[in-house]
Image (cartoon, rainbow, N blue to C red):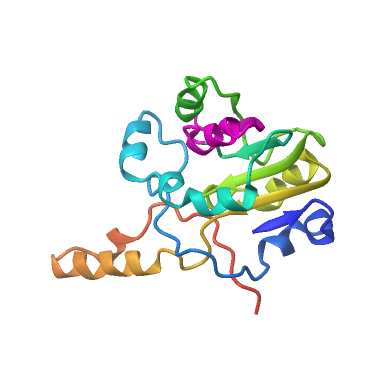
Amino acid sequence: RVMPRSCPTIASDPESFLHRRLPPAVPEMACRVCGPGMGSSVSDFQKNFHTGRVLGGYIMGLLAPAPGMRILDLGCGDGLLMKQMVDAGAEVVGIDVDENFVAAAAAQGLDARCMDGATMDFKREFDYVFSNATLHWMKADPPAVCRAVHAALRDGGTFVAEFGGQGNVRAIVEALGVELEARGSSSEQGQPAERGYAPRSAS
C-alpha cells in the first residue's frame, strides 16, 4: 500500500486508515511466527522465516529506492532490505524493537536503531517511510504507529508498506488444527500463541 503524507485519512483518522480496503497484491505467507522480540533466534529467522527475502521484491519495487531519497525502514529486522536501499544510493535509517536484529543490521554498517514504532519521535525527517511484514506485529496501539509515521514524513512524503491482513494465514492454522486432531491433540494447540494486528476489509 502506498499512501502519501498529505492523505487526509491517515493524517486525521489513523484508525480508519488501518481498516481501509486494500487491493490484492501478492499472496501472503506466514510471517514471523515466532513473533516480535525473537531474542537470539536471528539465524533461525534468516534461515526459515525471512519474508523480506521471499516477498520483499514486490514492496521494494513500489519504493524504488534511489539516490537523494531519505528513507525510514520501520521494522528493519536484520537489515536485508535496508541494505538494498543503501546500495541503491538512498540514505536510510532503520528501526526495530529487537536488539538482536538491530545488532545484525548494524554489523553490516547500517544505521539501525532499537526503537518502537508507536513511540518513535522523528519529526518530518523522511521522504519515505517503508515497512515490510512488520505492522501486523505492532498490535498494542496501531493508531499511534500511524501517527508516528505521519509525523516522521516530510510534506509530500510517502508511506510504502505491506503487512498481513485478517485471515492471511487461516489455511495454515486450519491445516495445523486438522493434523493435530488426527494425532489426538487439541486443535487449540495449532492456534498462534500471539495473534498479530489484522485489519478487516471495509464492508
Residue 138 placed where, x, y %? 58, 47
> Position of 98 compared to 118: left or right?
left
Q: Nearest the camera: 148 or 72?
A: 72
Q: Nearest the camera: 133 or 158?
A: 158
Dividing the picture into quadrants, the one containing residue 16 is bottom right
Classify the position of the N terminus by image quarter: bottom right
Count all numbered tags in the image, as a single digit. 0
Classify the position of the C terminus by image quarter: bottom right
> Position of 202 compared to 13: left or right?
left
Q: Is residue 2 above or below residue 119?
A: below
Magenta stretch encompasses residue 99 = no
Q: Which residues are magenta?
A: 77-98
Residue placed farthest to the bottom in the image? Answer: 203
Magenta stretch encompasses residue 80 = yes
Residue 154 placed where, x, y %? 82, 40
Residue 140 placed where, x, y %? 60, 48
In the image, what residue occupies the spot 84% across and 60% down? 8
Residue 135 makes an appearance in the image: no
In the image, what residue occupies the spot 71% across and 43% down? 128
Q: Is residue 68 above or below residue 64?
A: above
Dividing the picture into quadrants, the one containing residue 24 is bottom right
Q: Is residue 134 above or below residue 30?
A: above
Residue 94 placed where, x, y %? 60, 32
Dividing the picture into quadrants, the one containing residue 173 is bottom left
In the image, what residue occupies the spot 72% across and 62% down? 17
Residue 13 makes an appearance in the image: yes
> Position of 111 compared to 68: left or right?
left
In the image, what residue occupies the spot 64% across and 40% down? 117
